[in-house]
């Protein structure tokens, strides 16, 4: 079995005591967690935004909008029910039945180092083989650079997220089925960003057609297919193509809330790419979000990278044998 990929989970730390905050920061750094903080007056707005998060670390003495401790935990759970909450208590850590429904784990500061197992189960419940994570980033960047000419591309380090939020107005879904996985790849982008990208892709087309909804959708569909084809060639063996269709689960999309559910509580593998149009001297980056949801089947022990991909790199001189 391949070694687990080095991934991080972004967590929101709601802690106002300096000593406890420093202890949490040190713990997060040793547990592959990326801690971020927010001022109480901005907390609710941040949670209602499309920020990627994996968990909330909440102190009982942290207050926001007249709520504190366990009452605040209930409100945070109402807003973001998919995020596990780890509650730091000063003394009494027994949870009522109602509290247990919203708090994943309660602990005292001196018990922080003993939480590794809880973190592993709650946040890193799936193993993503390193060749898979590395390969997805590589093939996606190659597809984007092939589809959109004259761009500069930067890929962020992949992270694990547990939210169910939608980024942007345009997104595509395509099924992934192999002996080792069944799920979906999803691409998400803001419509105005996609319009900027496809204006160069369709530069010779009449402006009225270039800016049409159909043209925008076609470009995004082609991009999705390019990435899916590269994924299939690299990671799905030929014999997997004959897999019979199995039971599906409903996909729930709530547009006003920018929410999507795949019927599973498993974390999602998330990539984010920043693209700049080189023809423009200035301008903000265009963000493209990519998620992999293995909600129907996940057997990483069966994962294999196609040898043909490595052979082609050897033949081209990209790889050399010792």
Image (cartoon, rainbow, N blue to C red):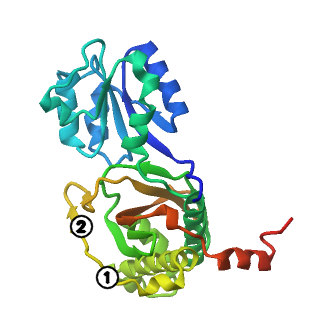
Q: Which residue is located at x 47 percent, y 24 percent?
A: 113
Task: Answer whether residue 318 is visible to the viewer in this image.
Answer: yes
Determine the residue positioned at 20% across, 25% down.
95
67 vs 246, left or right, is left
- Write the residue at 37% across / 46% down: 51
The residue to which callout 2 is attached is 251
Residue 41 rendering spot, x and y as whole percentages: 28, 27
Answer whether labels 1 and 2 touch (C-beta < 8 Å).
no
Q: Which structural element holds mark 1?
A: loop
Report which quarter residue 2 is drawn in: bottom right
Q: Quadrant of the N terminus?
A: bottom right
Front residue of this view, candidates 28 and 122: 122
Specify whether residue 189 is in view: no
Distance of label 1 from label 2 (alpha carbons):
17 Å
Q: Nearer the viewer, residue 103 or 179?
A: 179
x then y, percent, for residue 7: 52, 48
For mark 1, does the 10 Å Cα neighbourhood hold few (<14), some (14 to 19), or many (20 or more) residues? few
Check the picture and name the quadrant holding the C terminus.
bottom right
Query: Vertical placement of 109 versus 96: above or below?
Result: above
Of residues 51 and 102, the one drawn nearer to the viewer in this rendering:
102
Drawn side of residue 220 relative to residue 60, left or right: right
Q: Nearer the viewer, mark 1 or mark 2?
A: 1
Q: Quadrant of residue 212?
A: bottom left
In the image, residue 28 lies at what x, y percent? Answer: 49, 31
Instruction: From the image, tell me which residue sits under label 1.
Output: 245
Of 165 and 96, nearer the camera is: 96
Residue 139 image-quadrant placement? bottom right
Above or below: residue 12 compared with residue 180: above
Q: Position of residue 194 (x, y in %)?
A: 42, 69
- Residue at the limit of the structure toward the left, as seen here: 98
């Amino acid at each position: 079995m391949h070694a687990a990929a080095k991934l991080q989970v972004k967590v929101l730390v709601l802690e106002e005591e300096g000593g406890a905050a420093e202890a949490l920061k040190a713990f997060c750094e040793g547990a592959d967690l990326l801690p971020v903080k927010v001022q109480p007056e901005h907390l609710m707005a941040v949670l209602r935004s499309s920020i990627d998060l994996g968990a909330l670390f909440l102190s009982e003495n942290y207050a926001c909008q007249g709520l504190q401790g366990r009452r605040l935990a209930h409100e945070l759970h109402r807003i973001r029910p998919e995020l596990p909450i780890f509650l730091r208590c000063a003394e009494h850590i027994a949870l009522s039945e109602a509290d247990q429904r919203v708090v994943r784990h309660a602990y005292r500061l001196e018990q922080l180092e003993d939480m590794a197992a809880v973190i592993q189960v709650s946040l890193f419940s799936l193993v993503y083989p390193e060749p898979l994570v590395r390969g997805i980033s590589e093939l996606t960047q190659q597809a984007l650079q092939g589809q959109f000419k004259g761009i500069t591309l930067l890929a962020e380090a992949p992270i694990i997220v547990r939210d169910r939020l939608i980024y942007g107005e345009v997104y595509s879904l395509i099924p992934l089925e192999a002996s080792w996985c069944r799920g979906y790849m999803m691409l998400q982008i803001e419509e105005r960003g996609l319009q900027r990208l496809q204006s160069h892709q369709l530069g010779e087309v009449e402006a009225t057609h270039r800016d049409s909804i159909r043209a925008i959708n076609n470009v995004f569909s082609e991009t999705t297919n390019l990435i899916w084809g590269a994924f299939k060639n690299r990671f799905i063996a030929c014999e997997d193509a004959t897999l019979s269709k199995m039971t599906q689960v409903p996909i729930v999309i709530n547009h006003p809330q920018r929410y999507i559910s795949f019927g599973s509580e498993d974390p999602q593998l998330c990539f984010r790419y920043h693209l700049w149009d080189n023809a423009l001297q200035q301008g903000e980056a265009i963000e493209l979000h990519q998620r992999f949801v293995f909600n129907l089947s996940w057997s990483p022990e069966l994962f294999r990278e196609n040898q043909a991909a490595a052979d082609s790199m050897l033949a081209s001189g990209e790889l050399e044998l010792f």
